[in-house]
Image: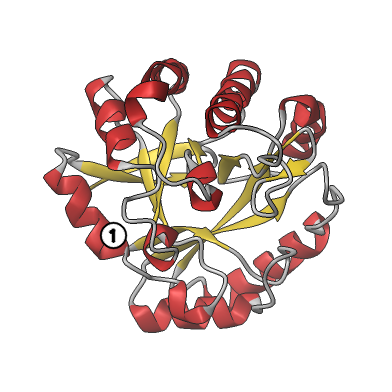
Amino acid sequence: MFANYHAHTYFSDDCSMPMEDCIKAAIKEGLNEICFTEHIDIGVYSMHDCDCEAYLKEFNRMNKLYGNKIKLKFGMEFGMQSHTIPQYEKIFRSYDFDFILLSMHQINNKEFWSQSFQSGKSQKQYIEEYYEELDRIVSNYNDYSVLGHMDVIRRYDRNGVYPFEKIKDKVEHILKKVIKNDKGIEVNTSCYRYNIGDLTPSINIIKLYKELGGEIITIGADSHHPEHVAYKIKDTEEILKDLGFKYFCTFEKMSPTFHEI
């Protein structure tokens, strides 16, 4: 199985790629399956930054055209905050999703990429607040498949790498809840494009997840351009294998299927 479980098209506010171009690129790269995970970030952005009805209509049209060549899955990336959980509960009930990527791009409506959230805080403050908010979300919301780019705050940290040992307890607390609720984590291959120098989440987090008994893991390219639809996915499979993982997952109707690496 060769699959990308984090793909965006022009239904996401930060992407201009037509869905058909994404599919054609995926077929060209030899992917067996691609899951679209269009953005909904309620907060700074409008909750309608993805037109769900238009997205579903185009997905169904593409499935009729290309479903015999590649398996297409209907997913969404929920860019959640603890105070926006009720809105996402409503969205989840409204559609028959295959997969939900639970991510966090902002806290108190302040974004990470713009430094709005980090501004005026020490590195210790914003890193700890990040994991505390993620903990609140996984404690109060369960209609998801995996945590997307779990330590994405590192991507936008201008103060360098924060020592893992200082936040290990917070990360472990989150992962234990994820595992207890039969959810998983994503390995996001955009880490190579951002030159982070580690996986996303970090190898320390992935190792801890495995030590705690975690088994559900997906690989997503976080693709926004055709050239990224298969980016470093096979390389990441090999890293996971070296770390002791035997399987990665795909999803259908929110249920995981395990594929041998």
Q: Position of residue 201 (x, y in %)?
A: 39, 43
Query: Residue visible at 36% across and 67% down?
Result: 32
Q: Position of residue 254 (x, y in %)?
A: 53, 38
Q: Amino acid at mark 1?
A: Met
Query: Residue visible at 53% across and 28% down?
Result: 124
**In the shown orientation, is residue 59 left or right of residue 50?**
left
In the displayed structure, 12 sits above or below 261; it is below
**In the shown orientation, is residue 76 left or right of residue 217?**
right
Q: Position of residue 136 (x, y in %)?
A: 63, 19
Query: Residue visible at 45% across and 80% down?
Result: 227
**In the shown orientation, is residue 11 left or right of residue 200?**
right
> Image quadrant of residue 110?
top right
In the displayed structure, 124 sits above or below 152; it is above
> Image quadrant of residue 92?
top right
- Residue that numbered label 1 is attached to: 1
Q: Is residue 261 visible?
A: no
In the displayed structure, 100 sits above or below 209; it is below
